[in-house]
Amino acid sequence: MMSEPTSGPHWPGLRWAELRRNVEALVFAAGEPLTVNKMMEAMGLEDAAARRAVEDILRELKAEFPQGGLRGFELVELGGGWAFRSHPESEEAVKALFELPTEVGRLSPAAMECLAIVAYMQPVTRPQISEIRGVNSDSPIRTLLDRELIADVGRAPSGGGAVLYGTTRRFETMFGLAGVEDLPALEGFALGEERKAELRRRLGLLTVPE
């Protein structure tokens, strides 16, 4: 155990350096955005003072590893949690290290259409998705469910109680969103070819050919 006295403003009963080290290690090791609740659960903490201390530490780390800073990675809020990610300006170096062969799958055009419909219209039912696309959408919806980009979020109050679908935290994380409210407005929305390729590349990191 560490012997340093506490230096945190909210939690005089715990060695601050030890708590800070544990929070940083949890975020680093999680592999996905980690909520404050999950961090506290992992450390066996429950009280309000502990929560304030963890939140203070996250603010410290965010200042130490800011977005657009000089470090190789940054602390960001994604999908309702906290995560470390590589600096955007280091993308080419990271991409070269983890480049996937071109044959590794991306979502099919049908699946991407369904994903866009769910993202902007959620919660939405399978029949509504098929009606918008004008074609049966069972297969691409199944693909999106298998890849955890959409999920069952409830039942429609009418129409036989059809399943309602919404996007997941995995979707938000892949597209760099703190939440669905960060989706670009549809009005006047247009993507250049370079940005389209980047979004397809991100999806390709977790997909296989259909």
Image (tube, rainbow, N blue to C red):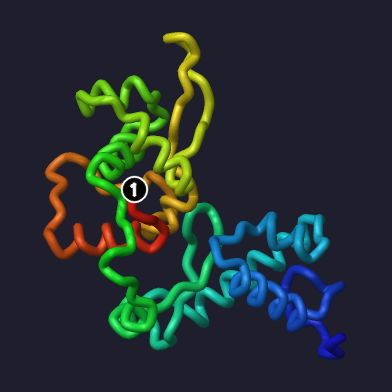
Q: Residue 10 or 192: which is nearer the viewer?
A: 192
Task: Say which residue appears at 45% left-offset and 80% top-offset.
Answer: 73
Say above or below: 149 vs 126.
below
Task: Give the left or right position of residue 70, taking residue 148 as reference.
Answer: left
Q: Quadrant of residue 37?
A: bottom right
What residue is at 53 percent from the left and 26 percent from the top? Answer: 154
Q: Is residue 87 above or below residue 184?
A: below
Mark 1 crowdedness (10 Å alpha carbons): few <14, some 14-19, many ≥20: few
Residue indicated by mark 1: 210
Number of marks in the rendered image:
1
Q: Residue 3 location in percent, x, y? A: 86, 90
Q: Residue at x 20, y 24 (%)?
A: 134
Camera-side residue: 149 or 206?
Answer: 206
Amino acid type indicated by mark 1: Glu
Please provide percent x and percent y for residue 59: 57, 71
Q: Quadrant of residue 100?
A: bottom left
